[in-house]
Amino acid sequence: AYRDVDPAKPEQAPELSSLREARRAFSEAVERERMPSEAYLHLAELTDEKRPEDPKLVAEVIELLGKAVEANDKLPRYAEREALYLAEVSFRARAIPKLEAVYERPGTSGKVPFALARLAREQLDFDELEALPETFDDWLEQAEARGGVPARDIEVLGAWALLERDKPQEALDLLEPMLAANEEDIELRVHVVHAYMELRDRDTALTTVKRGLGTLPDERKGLMFYEWANIMSRGGKRKAAATHAANGWKKLSTQGDVTPVDLLIYAGEAIRLLNRDKQPKPASSIGRDITELVPFHSDAWVIRADAEMRTNRGSDAKASAEKAVELDSQNPRAHDVLGQVWLRFGRKDRAKESFERALELAR
């Protein structure tokens, strides 16, 4: 197994047949070794290599990582990898307590506090927090001190925090030199656009978007179309906003390296703008797309259920809402959308149960 997958030589990508052989070898190792934690870890990582072709493998990867931790809970290496993976696939409710626990253990990398900071941003995006945690800046400081996180990533997340704290000019002072040095950095450009919009400089924001469209390769222009859509929407131009958002989704959904949380956020945004322009059918199509791309995440099925309700597909919406609850019974959004479905069916008693459960979980 180690012969075919050499972590010291990442530039030598193994052939598919070698990966299959390595996976079989690690599967055998977990049965034979007295301390199979390392074998479980490598088996999980090999399984995750297949996630682009089969996103449903996420559940298997999480199970394998959990077994690695059970096999050796004394070394923080395994607990850290499990917590970081849960954060990577945006299982926030499960990731945060594990990250907080491993954060206190000696020997963990800067990736742990950085992941906590990133998840705080996600929680704000999903209205799970009202403001940045007081520990946010400490997490970024620890990410830098402990190492393992690129300085650029820490600086960009810090600049985003300035935007969140209503300091757009300070954010621009950090971001613009970085963008000038790398015009193809999409995340930087998005934050620069947001800063100009916060400064009410719509013209410069739009110029920044169009420069990105002229600079970036065609397959990576998706987020620029979303920013264009946002500018049009704030200007009251619903049809243009919906058109740009739909174009953005077409590119983003095939880009290949978009994180699960960004897929969820931008699918929801495209659906919102299309419904605002009274285009429920294209919105419903995006609802189906997101459950193909992120089938393991409860929020994907929430998005789909909501889109299906708007096209009067009650039975489909009910199935999607129930799937959302099945995947994460602790997700208040899943219970809320199921309650809306029950109302559509006239089942006020069941709707009341779902809404009460949503409120209980949201507290």
Image (tube, rainbow, N blue to C red):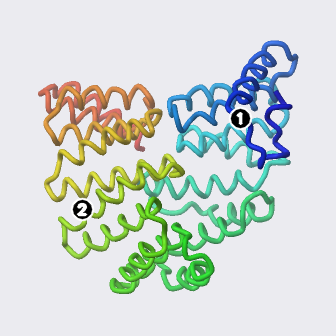
Q: Say which quadrant the N terminus sits in.
A: top right
Q: Is residue 360 left or right of residue 79?
A: left
Q: CA distance from mark 1 to mark 2?
A: 41 Å
Q: Residue at x 37, y 69 (%)?
A: 227
Does dot 2 land on a helix, a strand or a loop?
helix
* In the image: residue 82, left or right of residue 209: right
Residue 17: image quadrant is: top right
Label 1: few (<14), some (14–19) or many (≥20) C-alpha neighbours in 10 Å: few
| Residue appearing at x 52%, y 58% in the figure | 121
Residue found at the far top of this picture: 32
**Residue 307 to residue 34: above or below:** below
| Residue that numbered label 2 is attached to | 243
Helix, strand or loop status at disc 1: loop
Q: Earlier in the sequence, mark 1 or mark 2?
A: 1
Foreground disc of the pair 1, 2: 1
Image location (x, y in percent) of residue 215: 48, 74
Residue type, label 2: Thr
| Relative image position of residue 117 (x, y in whole percent) | 61, 58
Q: Is residue 134 visible?
A: yes
x 83%, y 46%: residue: 9
Give the residue type that dot 1 points to: Glu
- Identify the residue position indicated by label 1 in the image: 15
Mark 1–mark 2 contact, CB under 8 Å? no
Q: Residues within 10 Å of mark 2 (few under 14, many from 20)?
A: some
| Horizontal relation, residue 28 to residue 273: left or right | right
Residue 244 rendering spot, x and y as whole percentages: 29, 64
